[in-house]
Amino acid sequence: MAETLKEKTAKGLFWGAMNNGAMQVIGLVFGIVLGRLLSPSDYGMIAMITVFSLIANALQNSGFITAITNIKEPTDNDYNSVFWFNISVGGFLYLVLFLCAPLIAGYYHTPALVPLCRYAFLSLLFSSLCTAQSAYLFKHMMVKQRAQSGIIATLFSSVVGVIMAFCGMSYWALATQTIVYSIVNTALFWHYSPWRPSLRFDFEPIRRMFKFSCKLLASTITTHINNNVLNILLGHYFTAHDTGNYNQASQWNFKAYSVIQGMVDSVAQPVLVDLREQPGRQLEALRKLIRFTSFISFPLMLGFGMVAREFIVLAITEKWLASAFLLQILCVSGAIIPMSQLMSSLVVSNGKSGTYFGVTFALGVVQILTMILIWHWGIRTMVIAYVLLNIIWLFVWQYFSRRLIGYRVWMFLKDILPFALAALAVMTATYFATQSIHNLWLLLLCRILMAVVLYYLVMRIAGAAILKECMAFVKKKMGKK
């Protein structure tokens, strides 16, 4: 049983890596093209309304994907109830947002947001059609199928977005890209999931799951607000151009850290749920996931921060230079966010959705109050404060992990510090060793190559067990081919 779970976890991580790696490569290519074709104000327009779409999607999902995953053996009736509930809620929420569009535009003092809101929020209707299918794929750890759906949907929607941007359709291109993604992803989830709905309307499973899922719902909404708090406040206090510059930095930061977060998220909760009756094994599994995450996250994000200026200028031109410094700051939080997510998954997997909500809500309150108090000092100060708060909350999650399964501070630091210090030393050495290079293309290439080689050598000399395991698994997969 243990070997089966281990193999499923390894395969899940592999396909999670394939999925997120491919999607981020696609996002990189098309993000560069769109960044060159569109202006900061175009991105700012979309950034100002993104949080409303995210909250609506959270309300429509209502935490039932996670709730079903936490059920040992969900029935057909469980999936069917979720399916019809989500369609009903999705339609209702779109109607509410359609009517509230003038209020959203009034908050941002931008009348053009009214038609944009009513168009962009259509994605909610399409995504509501696949929540049950998504829950089925997630519960059964069908990571490969989810990966293929995401890659195809991202590629297709990105092509549509670029064509529209090239035709001069500004922020409408970004809105359409999201809608097309929802349509294609929904169609593919239906294709890969063998489960099909029936016309039986029984909402008893919804009532049964809601006690657990409602706390996750509230937590998800709070998380979306936390992640977009700067977009919300910048759009109100500053201009669409300023919001767009921050949003560009935030998007690139997200593209980078979601490579590792998406990979680990695809297996973390199902694995931790399977082991929740065995705290010792659950602790061992969490620590291994934390080490694996640290092994990749710290060099990836600190390295990205090191080359942020060169990357921004070369990829999307100097018109986005203001976002480069913001990206460098955000990369610090990007390095630790996947670890916070892992420990929050542990809390949820142990049925503590109330704790999950409380910790997330507290972060949201502190962030909003902090940003309102310091916005007079400018965007950079707000971004620095945002990063510091995320670092503090990493240890808040660790505290609750200790209470649940005995994951003590010294264990946590032992798991992350070797990789954090090694990555910091490598990036520092690389930065100063390449300072004399003035050609931006050569500088970018040299920094990337030097950092990769140095980090690999440090891990090899240190005899990092996680490096050996990763290489052994990759060789095994290549050997099968």
Image (cartoon, rainbow, N blue to C red):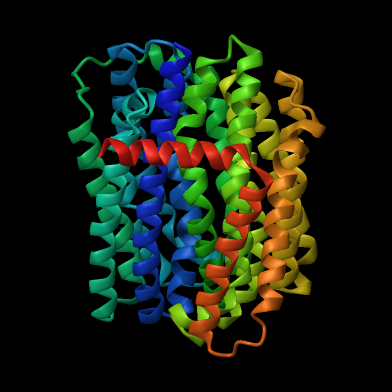
Residue beneath the point at 39% across and 81% down: 36
Asked whether residue 411 is in view, the answer is yes
Asked whether residue 128 is in view, the answer is no
Q: Is residue 218 left or right of residue 265?
A: right
Quadrant (top left/top right/bottom left/bottom right) for the C terminus: top left
Percent of width and height locating residue 182: 29, 48
* Depth check, front residue: 235 or 195: 195
Percent of width and height locating residue 476: 37, 35
Figure check: 411 above or below 93: above
Quadrant (top left/top right/bottom left/bottom right) for the N terminus: top left
Figure check: 243 above or below 2: below
Residue 141 in which image quadrant:
top left
Q: Is residue 362 left or right of residue 240?
A: right
Residue 327 in which image quadrant:
bottom right
Residue beneath the point at 61% across and 10% down: 278
Q: Residue furthest bottom?
A: 438
Residue beneath the point at 58% across and 14% down: 276
Percent of width and height locating residue 63: 47, 29
Percent of width and height locating residue 272: 54, 22
Residue 411 in which image quadrant:
top right
* Depth check, front residue: 85 or 80: 80
